[in-house]
Image: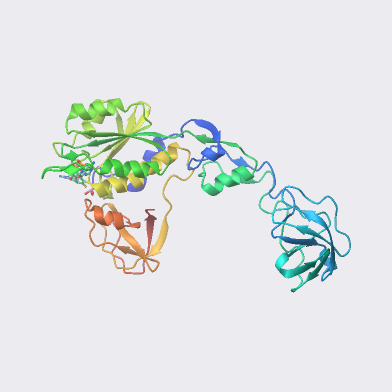
Amino acid sequence: MAGLLPLDEAQARLLALAEALPIETIAVAEAGGRWAASDIIARRSQPAADLSAMDGYAVRHMDLPGPFRIIGESAAGKGFPGSPGAAEAVRIFTGAAVPEGADTVIMQENCAREGDTLRLTAQPPAPGRDIRVRGSDFSEHALLVARGARMTPAAIALAIMGGHGTVPVHRRARIALISTGDELAAPGAVTGPHQIPASNGPMLAAMLRSTGCDVDDMGVVGDDLDSIKGAVDAARRHDVILTIGGASVGDHDLVKPAFLACRATLDFIKVALKPGKPLMAGRLANALVLGLPGNPVSAYVTCFLFALPLVRKLMGAATPLAPVLPLPLGAAMPAVGNRTEFIRGKIEDGRALPFRNQDSAALALLAEAAILIRRNAGAQAVPAGTIVDTLRLD
Ligand SMILES: Nc1nc2c(c(=O)[nH]1)N[C@H]1C(S)=C(S)[C@@H](COP(=O)(O)OP(=O)(O)OC[C@H]3O[C@@H](n4cnc5c(N)ncnc54)[C@H](O)[C@@H]3O)O[C@H]1N2
Ligand code: MOO
């Protein structure tokens, strides 16, 4: 159909508009959820010495099965200066350095101590048992976190363990959210028959904040050109101006004229996507503009497929699109029309199960959905068991 841009092309064109935001150096402890702006390389080896993995006794394996004479103690933070000789053992604690010459730790449950004498009470441990060898986690100069990777909780710990106190990241993207519609009422307000609660703004704000960006929810403007234009103008200093609703072809759908009146250049205005056909994107001075459709499910799906990847790209993500999880279908699915479809569903017994009702205004089922099942434009009907691409919604 003329004017409908294929989904993958639309995503690629939007991401091509976005350049990563400026870099700032911040404390690693504050970097959770950001994306590394350069490779993070280990400045130290971990462990820095051979360490005991258990509370017990360090011995030379060749002296097993003992008995041993206990000659001292190595605790975490202060090691034992000497080294055990023949049939000698050093009391040792988890995380303490293994003394020079010792090569095996006997955990204390497997031996008995009487005064300074230690006897094995179980099978002898294998050589090297319960010792974390120097550099066994990572060595100095190893790549710990690649540029463009997310600073997950584990990546934060890894960077700090690698000797880093600060890390370069891209600054947070600043997103303006503008909801449009004369029918929209404030959350919690009593609504008349011609009103509905404005749920999309808070929903998208919550989705966007999961990327770590700053969201400025500018609230609701009515369906008139000047109001929408005024709101878009007021949002110019943001990195992304995201509008909701008014994207279609009705007489009250004024987002496109408002963008154009603000001198935005639009890159595309319709995508071969269901839900989410009326979707426009472009540039307005230093900001990117994204006009999402108003139907709640369409707004959710287009935010997931376009707005979230855009924010990730701005914040430096190497792979901004959501990862694909191939799953077998739990039910047959019909042929697909000329728009790529994203069907809400859940995972049951490892299979993707589409929900029956796919109305793009149905929120109860959206809240239950765990996955979107992707079916490409023009695809044939498929039987249960067919492997399909899914996207997780958590
Ligand atoms: N003649 C045609 N009509 C429509 C077409 C079309 O191609 N030709 N496309 C349909 C599709 S597809 C979609 S999706 C919708 C999207 O339209 P808009 O982006 O213009 O959205 P609105 O008309 O403003 O609203 C649609 C629907 O969603 C409700 N809404 C809007 N904003 C919010 C909000 N912030 N919170 C909760 N609900 C919201 C609004 O009240 C409407 O019920 O157009 C089809 N029409
Ligand atoms: O984009 Mo709309 O949700 O297809 O009805």
Q: Whole-percent x and y of residue 255?
A: 23, 34
Q: Whole-percent x and y of residue 194?
A: 11, 43
Residue at point 77% right, 62% down?
Answer: 57
Image quarter of residue 245:
top left
Tell me if I can see residue 68 in this picture: yes
Image quarter of residue 308:
top left
- The outermost residue toward the right is 86
In the image: residue 137, left or right of residue 169: right
Vertical placement of residue 257 versus 113, above or below: above
Vertical placement of residue 259 versus 153, above or below: above
Q: Relative to the observer, which residue lies in front, 380 or 205?
A: 205
Q: Relative to the observer, which residue lies in front, 15 or 304?
A: 304
Residue at point 63% right, 45% down?
Answer: 161
Q: Relative to the observer, which residue lies in front, 28 or 98?
A: 98
Vertical placement of residue 155 versus 383, above or below: above
Vertical placement of residue 295 versus 111, above or below: above
Q: Relative to the observer, which residue lies in front, 192 or 117?
A: 117
Tell me if I can see residue 343 in this picture: no
In the image: residue 347, left or right of residue 142: left
Q: Whole-percent x and y of residue 382?
A: 31, 66
In the image: residue 130, left or right of residue 26: right
